[in-house]
Image (spheres, rainbow, N blue to C red):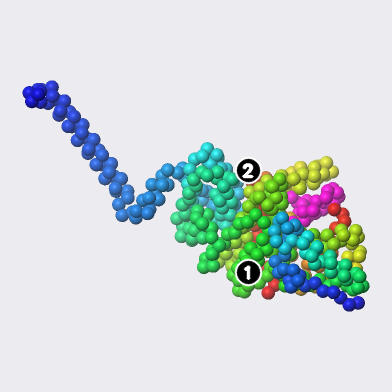
Amino acid sequence: MDKLIIKIADDYTTIPGVREEIEGDFPGEEFLERILLPKFKQALSKKKKLFIDLDGTAGYATSFLEAAFGGLTREYKESKIVLDNLDFKSDDDPFLEEDIIEYIREANDK
Amino acid sequence: MKKLYTTAEYKKRNTKQAKDRLKQRLSSKEKVKKKRGTIDGVPIEEQRERSLISQFESLPAPSNFSFVENTVAILSYLELIINKIKHRKPILINLKEITHLTNDAIVLLLAVVKNPAITKGVPIKGNYPKDDELRKIFQESGVFGANGTDNEHKNYILTRQNKKAEGGIANEMIKRATKIVFGQEARCPGVYRALMESMANTCYHAKPTQIGHETWWLTVYHDKALNKVSFAFIDMGVGIFKSSKMSGFRDNLKSFFGITDNREVLKEIISGRKMSSTKIPYRGKGLPNIYKGLERNYYSNLKIISNDVKADLSTDKYERLSKEFSGTFLYWELNNTNRWTS
């Protein structure tokens, strides 16, 4: 299965913010709207996986990740479709993928 | 008329007046001499400073000026400062006699003396500790002067403030800290996460009715002897347990589990154990994840002080404070055993 790729450090920012724009620059909600959601839709329509490269940034706030990946899951109402169509690379922070999967699984509990 | 000057009555009166004038002149001379004695050889700048300071009420600070170690004494001192301000008394924060200092107390002092909502235009001055090393730390912190951003040449302490979550500031502080601790500029995703979550909590929860109105303060201090960098973060909002986000969660902890003590509430927040069972739409994953950073060895010696709780999460020690702190304080250290990435 071929892949579409988002490298957050190149395609968005090296200093991701938090959840909402009111809290600061480069928020997770903006990343979801501008980059993640359009690319995910594109990946689904092309029957490709979306590969997220998380390396190269200063790090990620929990609220950024929850707004982006939890937010994506809330768009699709269920976590399975998101989990089945996303792949991650995170060499900088080995715990990140596990955290994101948790946010995706818990996204619709809110 | 001339005859009058020679009368005995005039002579008597004149002699008495002359004696009194002489006495007054001598006493005045004595006073001037005494006053001059205290300032002889003192530079004019210092003389002006002394004269200005004499108009302020001096409040001697606790000799152990550390918020994490001497919490209640520092809170009492803070309360004293705030009370004097309420009575519109100009105050002098007298740090001359302090013998021990940690950067967390500086960040607390910064959050008070640089906050116009607290100082309300009341003049506040401060002096520096006698101890050379402690004085340098204070001078570089900018507590009693301009807290510029040009700290490039300074060795001890960096301070930053803002109202929003600023990734640029977090990144800059981490780069500087890692250069000291690891000998090269590096990234610490866990420290970045903790800083961003702390800033976001201030922005959203410190004053729930006014998003983005509360200022956060951060100091980063290099302890050369122990080769560690400590991060002290503070906001003077309502504190963790009085945040509106917490009210539903607290109510349910009380009704489901009988938990009312804030120490237990904090344990539950940190562990996330009872979060899901209370079915409260609590989306604040900030604190549990700051704790995860400690478990994952991104930093060490994590402490939280908020409202009536002081928690040392590294040793799992939770204390109830006899004096309440209205705000949220977080502290952690970065040393060369912690996780980082180049």
Specify whether residue B99 is painted magenta. no
Decide: is A110 above or below B90. Answer: below
Query: How far across and down, in percent of the image, does residue B243 sit?
Result: 72, 46
Residue at figure coordinates x 46%, y 57% from the top left: B131
Mark linked to residue A15: none
Q: Is residue B169 left or right of residue A95?
A: left
- Is residue B109 visible to us here? no
Q: Disc 1 marks which residue? A: B175
Q: Secondary structure at mark 2?
A: strand
Which segment is the magenta one?
A: B266-286
* Nearer-the-camera pick, B337 or B331: B331
Tag 2 and tag 1 share a subunit: yes
* Residue behind mark 2: B323
Q: Residue at x 76, y 47 (%)?
A: B246
Above or below: residue A5 compared with residue B80 = below
Residue B267 sits inside the magenta stretch? yes
Where disc 1 sits, the SS reads helix
The percent position of residue B191, horizontal first and vertical second, equals 68, 64
